[in-house]
Image (cartoon, grey):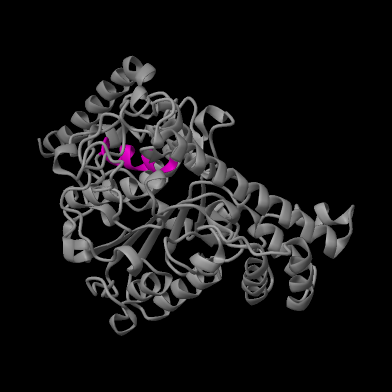
Amino acid sequence: MIRYIAGVPLIVLLLLITVVESRQISDEFIRLPSDRSSLLDHAFPQIDAVDDDSVGTRWAVLIAGSNGYWNYRHQADVCHAYQILKKGGLKDENIIVFMYDDIAYHEENPRPGVIINNPHGSDVYAGVPKDYTGEHVTVNNFLAVLLGNKAAVTGGSGKVVDSGPNDHIFIYYSDHGGAGVLGMPTTPFLYADELIDTLKKKHASGTYKSLVFYVEACESGSIFEGLLPEGLNIYATTASNAVESSWGAYCPGDYPSPPPEYDTCLGDLYSAAWMEDSESHNLRTETLKRQYELVKTRTANGGSYYGSHVLQFGDKELSKDKLYMYMGTNPANENFTFVYDNALRPRSSKAVNQRDADLVHFWEKFRKAPEGSEKKMEAQSRFVEAMSHRVHLDHSIKLVGKLLFGMTKGPEVLQTVRPAGQPLVDDWKCLKTLIKTFEMHCGSLSQYGMKHMRSVANICNAGITADQMAEASAQACPTVPSGHLSSLHRGFSA
């Protein structure tokens, strides 16, 4: 009799597995292969759920590294991320937001005080903390906040990641990037060596248990490639590999397209993928690895030109962690066990290269403006100015390469890509020096010019000195550009 009673749970378990197995057959056509867990996951979705008591304080740092209405999507991404974390139960005192905050009430915003992150999305701006805005969105403040160094922070709310040894940290960055560099709305930019050094210091301080870092930027794989060691309890994913662009999403001409009154991209492809996935899953049971696989599939965009290769770095064992440990969970999602296929199918049929999003904005403004109007002339002027700046930078870098290495070898040196696993450059101080030298003569690299970071790194790796770079740059650029994109007004990227 005792044996019979003891055996009942086993019989029930076998029956449940049989039911789940049969349901899987009928559900097969609507479930993504990468979204299937084990049979027991479906039968008992809470078996592997994280106990609240096992998680220390969750911290989050969200940073949009751009300004300007044409970069609407970056601040929209960050505001959306805040809403997900807030619904997940994170407290404002533990969420630190960096954004220039010039979008919501910008004169071009068709819905003043409102920011949306997809065509049918609700307002994601409401309630977002204004911790570091405007000129306080700086590299120094960002790194000081990560380290919990209140004394090093200038301006803003003064909030820092004051974490302890049992805490979990989530960092999300969205902006333009280039090989070894992430953009900021102020100068200088954030260089990979500085970021990695800061993460190592954070680990050495013993003030976190694990840290997850999501990066949305062009060539973002280069930020960690050959630089982020294992053993720091850090897991990172990037929107692209070390040599390719990332992509805007929900852009004019895309499908789905933003509402007709918008003339800018509302989001970014990788960012939309991880956030929309987070909103449609039970984060108590979904792992970082599962989200990585789903985001990787969607961001590849069916392997088309309009997509990029999402990568992962660092301590990949952490990918077994539940997302709940970093993002909390929305109680409304706790009954979700899988996602319908059409919820995670690549939605962007024609995403926009991040570096071309400003051109799309200016062109849309030009196209919509009445013939002969001041708005049409202004939009045309901005478009022409942006194109002229690009042509100038492209020509100048190519000419510098030819002056340093010769007509044939120059292009070859500039286009060299190091093997996977190697960092971008051997001497980061050299890279920053040569960037500043070039900008002194040829003007600011700006967001678009970040695409040439690898070329300058290759010049460093070839042993070119600052004096040689200065001479070549002076010949390539006899006069320094004086427009608003000039380093005379913007400052230097390094």
- Residue 60 in which image quadrant: bottom left
Examine the rendered structure and indicate whether residue 137 appears above or below residue 322: below
Q: In the rendered picture of this protein, how many numbered marks are placed on residues?
A: 0
Is 417 in the magenta?
A: no
Examine the rendered structure and indicate whether residue 48 appears above or below residue 211: above
- Seen from the viewer's position, the closer of residues 113 and 224 is 113
Give me the residue at 45% from left, 33% from top. 298
The residue stretch that appears in magenta: 270-281
Mark yes or no: residue 113 visible.
Answer: yes
Residue 289, horizontal then vertical, whole percent:
42, 46
Residue 260, horizontal then vertical, whole percent:
32, 25
- Seen from the viewer's position, the closer of residues 480 and 271 is 480
Residue 188, horizontal then vertical, whole percent:
49, 69
- Residue 331 in which image quadrant: top left
Q: Taken as a whole, is the magenta stretch helix, strand or loop?
A: helix
- Seen from the viewer's position, the closer of residues 467 and 96 is 467
Give me the residue at 51% from left, 42% from top. 381
Give me the residue at 55% from left, 39% from top. 308
